[in-house]
């Protein structure tokens, strides 16, 4: 059930700028899950972490360098976040 809820949350995020901003401002995973719950989604920590791990595995070498503090800029990181490539926190 949690994976379906996560998929529904990710779909909603594509069109809901307010929810995107709330999640970007989350201090940690517990805050992310609380925001998701307030928005009507029941997502487990395990589902979220599995999603993040899968997203990380799909990153290119260039994207990994941006995240790890390599030659990428903050703007490049923001672009990757807005495309759903990664979630900043």
Image: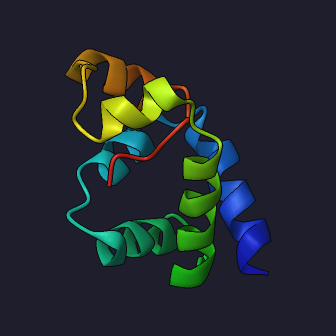
Quadrant in which residue 12 is drawn: top right
Q: Please provide percent x and percent y for residue 10.
A: 63, 49
Vertically, is 65 above or below 36? Answer: above
Which residue is depicted at the point 22% across and 35% down? 69
The answer to whether residue 22 is above or below residue 80 is: below
Vertically, is 40 above or below 58?
A: below
Vertical arrangement, residue 64 with respect to residue 49, above or below: above
The answer to whether 79 appears left or right of 73 in the picture is right
Q: Nearer the viewer, residue 39 or 67?
A: 67
- Residue 65 in the image: state x and y as whole percent: 35, 32
Where is residue 47, by image quadrant?
bottom right
- The total of numbered circles placed on residues is 0
Left or right for 9, reference 16:
right
* Front residue of this view, candidates 83 and 74: 74
- Quadrant of the drawing holding the C terminus: bottom left
Whether residue 69 is visible: yes
Q: Is residue 38 left or right of residue 7?
A: left
**Display colour scheme:** rainbow
Confirm whether residue 41 shows in the render: no
Where residue 51 appears, x then y in whole percent? Answer: 62, 62
**Position of 45 compared to 64: left or right?**
right
Residue found 66% across the figure and 64% down from its top: 6
Question: Which of the 4 quarters of the picture holds residue 64?
Answer: top left
């Amino acid at each position: 059930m949690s994976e379906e809820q996560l998929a529904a949350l990710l779909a909603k995020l594509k069109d809901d700028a307010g929810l995107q901003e709330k999640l970007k401002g989350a201090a940690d995973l517990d805050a992310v899950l609380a925001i998701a719950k307030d928005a009507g989604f029941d997502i487990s920590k395990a589902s979220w972490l599995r999603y993040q791990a899968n997203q990380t595995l799909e990153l290119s070498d260039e994207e990994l360098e941006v995240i790890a503090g390599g030659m990428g800029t903050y703007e490049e990181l923001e672009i990757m976040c807005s495309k759903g490539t990664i979630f900043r926190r």
